[in-house]
Amino acid sequence: MPRVVDNVQIGPMTWKMRVEVPRLVAKAKAGQFVIIRVNESGERVPMSIAGLNKDEGLLTIIYQVVGKTSALMTTVEGGGEISDCVGPLGVASHVENWGTACVVGGGIGIAPVYPIAQAYKEAGNKVISIIGARSKENLFYEKEHGEVADELHVCTDDGSYGHAGFVSDVLDKLLKDGAPIKMVMAIGPVPMMRVVTRVTKEYEVPTWVSLNPLMVDGTGMCGGCRVTVGGETKFACVDGPDFDGHAVDFDILTKRLNAYKEQERRAMKKFLDDPHCRLAESVRQFTYPGTK
Amino acid sequence: MVQKIEKKERMKIQRAQMPEQAPEERVRNFNEVPHGLTEEQALSEAQRCLECKKAPCIDGCPVEVDIPAFINLILEKDYAAAARKIKETNSLPAVCGRVCPQEEQCEIKCVLAKKFKPVAIGHLERFVADYERENDLVQIPAVAPPTGKKVAIVGSGPAGLTVAGDLVKLGHEITIFEALHKPGGVLVYGIPEFRLPKNIVQAECDAMRDTGVTFENSTIVGKMDTIDELFEQGYDAVFIGTGAGLPNFMGIEGEQLIGIYSANEYLTRSNLMRAFDEEGYDTPIIRGTNVAVLGGGNTAMDAVRTSKRLGADHSYIVYRRSEAEMPARAEEIHHAMDEGIEFHMLTTPIKFIGDEEGRVKQMECLKMELGPPDDSGRRRPVPIEGSNFIMDVDLVVVAIGNSSNPLIQSTTPGLETNRWGNITVNPETMQTSRPGVYAGGDIVTGGATVILAAGAGKKAARAIHQYLTNGAKPE
Ligand SMILES: Cc1cc2nc3c(=O)[nH]c(=O)nc-3n(C[C@H](O)[C@H](O)[C@H](O)COP(=O)(O)OP(=O)(O)OC[C@H]3O[C@@H](n4cnc5c(N)ncnc54)[C@H](O)[C@@H]3O)c2cc1C
Ligand SMILES: Cc1cc2nc3c(=O)[nH]c(=O)nc-3n(C[C@H](O)[C@H](O)[C@H](O)COP(=O)(O)OP(=O)(O)OC[C@H]3O[C@@H](n4cnc5c(N)ncnc54)[C@H](O)[C@@H]3O)c2cc1C
Ligand code: SF4
Ligand code: FES
């Protein structure tokens, strides 16, 4: 079973886990993802690659606590194990030297655009990175992005740090001011990716988005991850996760992500209500403020 | 040893009735439906066999199990020996005794079939295999001295497991790479618990591990190492048993709605991820009140019977041909009927209709009639103009077949495939266009049966052994 080297909280609801999976890491590339299972009764959850340490065989994933499984993940201690980690899954992000390329990361999307920014940089691009979060405390990887990007823009929705506003606003302004961006890669919540593609459509800048539909196997076997791109059905786990943002049907994606809303809510409540729940107090506070 | 009786007398014995859970009871649980024969029943059934010299039943068996010989061992009450007899040619009797279509293989050929009912070969096979396992009589086979040769097996379905079981005994070092977190292929992710309990598949895999087979689960060949890289790492031969795991959809309007599953997704959630047990496992599943399953094969029967157990009020089979053309096993169709499954024959959906949240709520269908036969020899269904009608459904499971997963083919240069993407092989040796690379099971034939996959594995194991020992370089 894969060993978890460390698993630390880096934001109110954000954790960073490093897993020792040398053979997987040797093959993995930016833009791909893995599927993990925490324990025998657990679900298979997809997680983007947020960092690869080829020398030590370490995979970094950064995750947000949104439900039972992500909450359960926080309980794994450094030195512990998870049941499975399979990958690398999906097609690696397309990388070439376009001259100037821009990565846009919103919320948890800040994590997966980091290795992509690195890959763009290595290919010789001038890299402009735009990262944004709800508030200052939700922001992470600013330093990492700063080390890679030729130009880093940071923003927060509430204006508590950096530019006040959305990542798409910053991108819009850059394009309006004539930044020579030839390619955009945007990863984040679906509404954010949708807005970014609207902006870049206007300036006719090709844009990749990384889609995160619900998945089961991640090998093309179930079709649960199907998305509509340019009117065609694609399986995000094998045909993606990166797709042409201007062709993606975001409406269908948004709806499909809500397929299990009711079951998810029940599972999370049951988990937190369990007196043995060892979950960090912060998660409990966030989900049910004011409880002990 | 049971006293043998006159042939005439034997023919008077009634075929044993498999005891099973009553339909009202079983639709509320996931326990296995048939309980298995009692010892008494098995002995009585074994008496029925006439021990034909030129046993036609053997010709009907794709792997030529010596049927009268194993039945005779039942009469000697040496059930473990009977199981071992079967295992000489079929390594998975507990599985095959449950899921093989005996009624169209060995039993249909049984001499008794014409005038009486055929010997219940499948039930007896299951009986001896269960007896052996439940009484801890499974022997770890003797393993030949190490040959120093390494074989990689891609996929742990019945094809891959059979190759592994045969080659490990011959002293080769065997590693099975499996994409999912549990080995067994369709046996674990597809076929439901109520037809094939998962502990049986697990026991088969455990026995193999004890014999020396290494299982590397959660390892996708082509994503992790490619076949060429396996050779570079010192493997001497590779067997590809990756199955037919790419679900087909209808390609009609509304197929992206929530509540429309492929059979693979629905069954994987329920079987592999055990979503039927909401208390014990985390993976969710849509349960549905009015469930339509599209298709008429074993997969469709498994899905529709699952939906009933998950609490549906109405579970429908919607099939575009008539009952006579349904490819599912007769036994499964009857089980489904007993469980109150409603059959809409000669019906095909043309559109799915959703609510504001994007959940399926209705399905528009057309009635069909049978025209002249098509390439498959079955009469072609043709739509009846203006016969459109609406069905209220909140869950639809599409069970219209699978295609081959292209991953291995696309990452293995020089591996030839046919126009459906199936790997082409020499039918005698199961060797592919690449030296040292063999393939078998659904990846070669398209969706078929457990025993055909296992039979292909047998052939491949023989050829691989020859290749590894005489270095019989392929022409
Ligand atoms: C290719 C891919 C890469 C991903 N990478 C990451 C990552 O790097 N970090 C990370 O935190 N999450 C990532 N996700 C999402 C992650 O898999 C889900 O957040 C996780 O499965 C939630 O499980 P849960 O039990 O905690 O929450 P659940 O109880 O299952 O869900 C709670 C809430 O989260 C939403 N949710 C569930 N699954 C997804 C999903 N697949 N995508 C978006 N929202 C979802 C639900 O709609 C629901 O509102 C990725 C998903 C995919 C498909
Ligand atoms: C729901 C259902 C019910 C059925 N019922 C019956 C029945 O009653 N009787 C009967 O005889 N037959 C039945 N069948 C058919 C039968 O199960 C198959 O014909 C048989 O399992 C094929 O075996 P296989 O070894 O070729 O492949 P599979 O059983 O499909 O196994 C292939 C395995 O390979 C793995 N794999 C794929 N690609 C890779 C890769 N790149 N790397 C590593 N691993 C990989 C897959 O994850 C899978 O586990 C049924 C099929 C289904 C779907
Ligand atoms: S054909 Fe029937 S009666 Fe004859 S050997 Fe086979 S099972 Fe026995
Ligand atoms: S997750 Fe099953 S096909 Fe993509």
Image: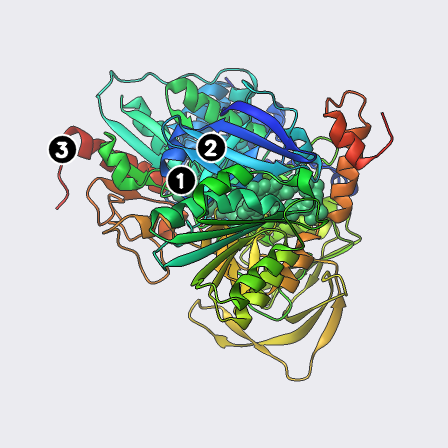
Q: Looking at the image, is B452 positioned above or below residue B391?
A: above
Q: Residue at x 52, y 69 (%)?
A: A230
Q: Residue at x 72, y 25 (%)?
A: A280
- The CA span between labels 2 and 3 is 41 Å
Q: Quadrant of residue A172?
A: bottom right
In this rendering, the label closer to the viewer, 2 or 3? 2
Q: Amino acid at mark 1?
A: Ala
Q: Quadrant of residue B318?
A: bottom right
Q: Looking at the image, is A72 positioned above or below residue A104?
A: above
> Label 2's element?
strand
**Is A254 on the left-hand or right-hand side of A58?**
right
Q: Are marks 1 and 2 in contact (CB under 8 Å)?
A: yes
- In the image, are marks 3 and 1 on the same chain? no
Q: Quadrant of residue B162?
A: top left
**Is A129 on the left-hand or right-hand side of B366?**
left
Residue B35 % position (x, y): 65, 31
Say which of B372 and A242 sits in front.
A242
> Label 1's element?
loop
Query: Label 1 CB, ligand 1: below 8 Å?
Result: no
Q: Circle 3 is placed at which residue position? A: B471
Q: Chain of mark 2?
A: A
> Label 3's element?
loop
- The CA span between labels 3 and 1 is 36 Å
Q: Circle 2 is placed at which residue position? A: A59
